[in-house]
Each structure stands twice: as C-alpha cells, then as structure tokens.
Amino acid sequence: MAENIKLNKTVFDKSQYSKTIDNSFNELGVNPTSDELDSQPTVEEFFSLYNQLFYSIPELGINNSHQYLIKKSSDYINFDENSEIIEELQKEITQLRVELLDSQKQIVELETGTPLEDRQNPNTPNSTTNINTSTNTNTSTSGTGGGGGTSGGGGGY
C-alpha cells in the first residue's frame, strides 16, 4: 500500500527572502510606545471616566483618592499662591464680622439705653472691644431684604 504524495516546496533566493519574510526581532508581549499612547484615554475620556467613578473614589488616602488628586493638581498649578489670597480674604471677612457685631451691639445699646457687656471679657464691666473699625462710610443697601429692626439682623434674602 504505497501511496505517492506530492510535496511542493517554495524556495526563495536571498533577495526575495528578505523582501517576503519579516526577519526582524520582536520581543513577545511588549507593545511599542506608540501603541501604549494610542491606548491611553483622551482628556475627554478621562473626565468621563472620572465622573462615572467619582463616588467610588475614596475621599482620603495617600494614593488613588480625592485627596491625592487635589494635592497633585494643587502642586501642578501652584495653588499655594491662591491660598495666600484666600487667607487674606478670610481675615478680612473675620474683621468685617467683628465690626458688624459691634455695630449690632451699638444699635441694641442705643435702642434699649442699656450698655452691653463685652462677651470676650465678661469680668470687665462696660468694656468695649478695642478693634480698628475704620471702614468706608459710603455704604448703600441695594437688593431685597432691607434692614433688620430690633431683632438685630435680617436682609439679603
């Protein structure tokens, strides 16, 4: 039971071989850098993913948290410069609140005719808060809400 099998063999000469067969060395499992860059999400895709994962991200933590993202972004944009401005504005707000409280105390004292004790030092009778209250006297009330009356406040709603 002998059978004849025909085998066909293709032979390339040296010049055809290098044109036909890729004989460059490629490492298995390593993607070229261009392929990796192509697989990276775009900025739009990143923010879409971020919005989807927002509540899944831990609030605090050294890595992979909102705290981490805030710190990295703050470092990148030199956010400390803005925090100095914020601190100054917070100091100004505190000063304005103290001045407002003093003004409200004066209104109550004028309406009742009774001096109020200083809440910061209740042991000193009839003491007043020694705070620089120089402000621009050119104020106006605009908008809705109006003044306060004897309740000591109101306005701006």
Image (cartoon, rainbow, N blue to C red):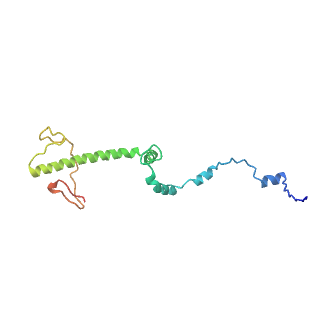
* Residue in the picture at 13% in, 50% down: 108
Question: Quadrant where the C terminus lies?
Answer: bottom left
- Which image quarter is the N terminus in? bottom right
Residue nearest the observer in this picture, 12 or 86: 12
Q: Residue furthest front?
A: 1
Residue 22 percent location from the top left of the image: 75, 52
Q: Judge from the rendering whether residue 32 lies leftward or rightward of residue 148; answer left or right.
A: right
Residue at the extreme top: 123
- Outermost residue to the left: 113
Q: Residue 84: name its quadrant.
A: top left
Residue 120 rendering spot, x and y as whole percentages: 19, 41
Residue at coordinates 45% horizontally, 50% vertically from top-left? Answer: 57
Q: Is 21 situated left or right of 95 in this image?
A: right
Q: Which residue is drawn at 44% across and 48% down?
A: 58
- Which residue in the rendered view is the most extreme toward the right? 2
Pinpoint residue 50: horizontal percent, then vertical percent: 47, 54
Residue 22 left/right relative to 128: right
Q: As rendered, which of 106 and 116 lies closer to the eye?
A: 116
Q: Position of residue 118 (x, y in %)?
A: 16, 42
Q: How many marks can you see? A: 0
What is the quadrant of residue 122 in the picture? top left
